[in-house]
Image (tube, grey):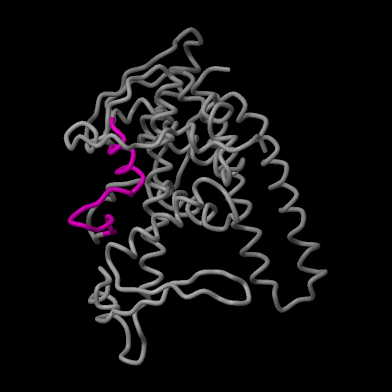
Amino acid sequence: MKELERDISMRRLTDTKYDIQKARISADNRLRIFPKELREDITNPLREQEEKLTKLMKARLNAFPIWTEWLYPVKGIGVNLASSLISIISIKFKPVSNEIFKDLTKKFEKYPDLTEIHVTNDSNGGELMSVTREQWMFGLKTEKDMLIPCRRGIGAFPKVSSLWKYAGLSVENGWRPKRVKGKNLGYNSKLRVLCWKIAEQFNKLQTGKYKLEIMLRKRKLYDKLMDYEIVIDLKTGKESYNILDATKCPKYDECVSKLKKAKKPSCKGHIHNMAKSNTVKLFMSHLWEKWRRLEGLPVRPSYAEEYLGHTTFSNPDDYLEEAK
C-alpha cells in the first residue's frame, strides 16, 4: 500500500468513526425522555459500527512504525488516540474550486495514462500545485469546494517547536494562542482538542510514566508559584494541596474580573491544567523525536538544548511501559 493511500485511509476511518460517535451521542441525548431500552435499540447499531471501525483502525495501525515501535507501549495511548494523532499529522487537505476539480476529472478520465496535472489553485491565492491521479481519486467534496489530500507527515516539522505551534501548544506573550475574531487560526483545532484528550487520558490513569509526570510537574508549579500546605486525608492517605495565598496564581486577576464577587477563582484547577498541558507538550516532543528518527530524518536539538545549554532532557524510550 502506498503511503498516501495508507495515510488517507486511516484519516477517513478516524473521521468516520468520530462522526458516527457524535451522531450516537446526539441521538442518545435527544431520546433521554424515552425508556433506556428504546434508546439502546436506536443507538446500539451506531455503537456496533464504531466498534467495527475501531477494529479496522487497529489492523491498519500496524503499518505505521511509530505505532508498533513507540506509541503502542505508551500507557494511556490506545487505538483511537493513536489513529487520530497519526492521521491528523500525516495528512493535510488543500481546497480547490469545483471548476478545477471538474477539469481534473475530465482529463484523468480521458487520458488513463496521465499521472499528474499542474493547476493554478485560485482557492489558495493562485498557488501553482500539482495533483496526482491518486490525490484526485481521494478528493473530498464539501459544501463550498473540493479538498485534495496531500501527504505531510512528521517531515513537515523540522523543529519540535513547529509541531507545538501546529498543535496549539506554543506560548505567545506568556499564554496559549486563542481564537481572534477575523483572523485565521495559527494551529490545527482538531489536533489541539486531541492533545487535550491525551492529557485527560494520562490524568485518569492510576499509574504510568506520564501520569507520574503530571504529578511531578504539579508539585514543581506549586513550589514555584504558590504559597501552600499539603493536607493528608487520614482515611485514604491521599495528599491534597491547600492554597494559602491565591493572589500569586498567574490567572488570579483574570479570574476575579470574570467571576462574581461571591465566587473564588479556581487556582487549584489552573495549576492542575498547567501540569497537564506541560506533560502533553513533553509527550508531543517525544513523539516528534521518535517519529523523525524512525523515518531517518534529522533531529534538531530544542532551543533550550541548542542555545541555553540544557542537558537534562528525557529519552522517549524511558516512557515506554510493558506491552498491553
Q: Is residue 167 magenta?
A: yes
Q: Position of residue 194 (x, y in %)?
A: 47, 49
- Residue sitting at 44 percent across and 10 percent down? 114
> Tag count in the figure?
0
Q: Report the magenta stretch's main SS.
A: loop
Asked whether 236 or 55 is in front, the reply is 236
Q: Residue furthest bottom?
A: 262
Asked whether 185 or 149 is in front, the reply is 185
Q: Position of residue 189 (x, y in %)?
A: 39, 50
Q: Quadrant of residue 44?
A: bottom right
Q: Position of residue 147 (x, y in %)?
A: 42, 36
Asked whether 69 or 218 is in front, the reply is 218
Quarter placement of the C terminus:
top right
Residue 311 lies, with reference to residue 273, above or below; the image says above
- Residue sitting at 29 percent across and 59 percent down? 179
Which stretch did the figure color magenta?
Answer: 159-179
- Residue sitting at 58 percent across and 54 percent down? 205
Q: Position of residue 209 (x, y in %)?
A: 52, 45
Q: Is residue 137 magenta?
A: no
Judge from the rendering whether residue 188 lies leftward or rightward of residue 232; answer left or right: left
Judge from the rendering whether residue 114 lies leftward or rightward of residue 94; answer left or right: right
Quarter placement of the N terminus:
top right
